Image (cartoon, rainbow, N blue to C red):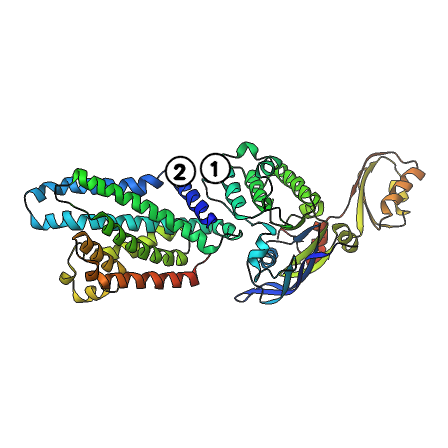
Amino acid sequence: MPPSPVIRVSGIRKTYGRLVAVDDVSLDVLEGEIFGLIGPNGAGKTTTMECVEGFRKPDRGTISVLSLDPVRDIYALQHRIGVQLQAAQLQKRITVWEAIDLWASLYPRTVDAEELLSGLGLAEKRDAWFMTLSGGQKQRLFIALALINDPEIVFLDELTTGLDPQARRTIWELVRGIRERGKTVFLTTHLMEEAERLCDRVAIIDHGRIIDLDTPERLIRRHCPECTVVLTTADGAAAEHFRGIPRLVQVAADGERFTLRGQGDDFISEVIQCLSERRMRVSDFRTLLPSLEDVFLRLTGHSIRD
Amino acid sequence: MKGLLKLTLLELKIFAREPMGLAGTILIPVAVFIAAGKALGPRVARADPAAGDFVMVGLPVLAALLIAFSAVLSLITIIAIYREGGILKRLRATPLRPHTILTAHVLVKLLLTAVTLALLVLAGRRFYPAGLHIPVVPFGVALLVTTLSILSMGFLIASLVPTARFAQPIAGLILYPMLGISGLFVPLGMLPPAVQSVALCLPVTYAVSLLKGILAGEPWLAHTTDLVALAITFVACTALSSRVFRWE
């Protein structure tokens, strides 16, 4: 039996004055998956997420989370979801343990707080003030607060923005850990690498509208089927040999370095086959596969950082 | 209820950790009160009636109001900082009800006001000329009513100020001039008529009248107008700020 949707969003629209923040957004999030809403800043990610969390009421459309109405049933829902908000802070001089303890006191059912802290690598920081924590530690604390009530769905809004690559990787591991415990994760990010590495399915959103929604692999295959091989060979007849590759689109040479672009899943195999049939010696061989970043560029005509 | 108690105690603890928190709220008003008493005390001894009246009635009322104002200013600043830092929003994303989050802050401020007042009473006994008698319980109740009323104005201001940077100066600009024409320094009757009618629209004027009266041992019934005015302020400001309060 395929997993059932735990979040159903259909046709929501949200405007702030004359600004249309979210326009006709529909999506389903399935039980047990990591679902990513990706797009540039201001695309409508946070507004969409906050409508789902019950913080904002959409002007139009319907949302159901765990079969509840997030605005009407907000208090019932809050016991079953965990929330990490974008750019949130805590009191400067609250300690890690005090925050955990306060949050734990607000829910009827909680996980073991000590275990949660050590699992997130915060055990040594339990008596540290919030203001003394590093960016990564703060985010881990917010993950802890989002998990304290053993929620069924965890919402993570721009979780790794502003973190260094090392801290980011640590957080990714933690998010995968959340999924392994059977939770559903709904996250937003403007980092395409993060979405590609972490998410089971992503929805690309730009200017308040969802452009496409699928697994990262399928999105890439659908929108950016080409791939590139870069290799170095001293073989004088290399350019000529390469032109015989069936799926080749373009070949460019820079001295002994060749860049071959082709289309389709078999292109790389064809390049390797050509090299072995012609007994060409190569001193370097790399494949460059398209990423979600390329998909985004192709779909929207602009880079996600513009 | 459990959440309110826990949050209140926690906020109190956090406040005590602020470097200037306790000193600014409690020690400075007490120190000013003692210094003023020391400076003016000798003139009372020389039986200067005007100075005597001010030391015996005006100064305790001024000190009490300054405590209330400092509680309100600090509340406004904290709310603004919490809002700007996303702390209010984060707390709101828990089963804590919005009014619980705000009530916790009000309780912290009331508690600090009470502690400061108690210290003032003790300091008054120790450092003021004989005869300064403060009816502690009635005066405490009057100050509680006053503080709640001014806190509600504070909430309204906190709902409207754009950024944390401006919260304190704006609130100060609104509150302190009210004190200037409240009848504490210059009797209301001696103010120009236009200023008098403005003063009569301001809650601080009624607070001063109430506190002075209770301090002088007048009965509560003589101050029904003051109590009603402060209650109207409280209800109106609370109702209004619950409509316009911004969580983020």
Give percent across and percent down for residue A75. 55, 56
Name the amino acid, label 1. Answer: Trp
Can you give x and y, in whole percent of width and height, for residue A73 in the image? 58, 60
Q: Nearer the viewer, residue B21 or A238?
A: B21
Percent position (x, y) of residue A193? 68, 45
Q: Residue at x 37, y 49 (%)?
A: B107
Q: Is residue B246 left or right of residue A39?
A: left
State which quadrant residue A10 falls in.
Answer: bottom right
Which residue is identified by label 1? A129
Residue at mark 1 shares a chain with residue at mark 2: no
Mark 2 lies on a secondary structure that is helix
Image-based side of B226 in relation to A200, left or right: left
Confirm whether residue B35 shows in the render.
Answer: no
Question: Toward the viewer: B104 or B153?
Answer: B104
Q: Residue at x 52, y 48 (%)?
A: A106
How many neighbours does mark 1 have within 10 angstroms: few (below 14), some (14-19), or many (20 or more)? Answer: some
Task: Name the side, left or right, on which B137 lies relative to B75.
Answer: left
Checking the image for residue B17, the label placed there is 2
* In contact (CB < 8 Å): disc 1 and disc 2: yes
Picture residue at 61% right of the left edge, 38% below the top: A167
Q: Amino acid at mark 2?
A: Arg
Name the residue furthest right.
Answer: A277
Q: Chain of mark 1?
A: A
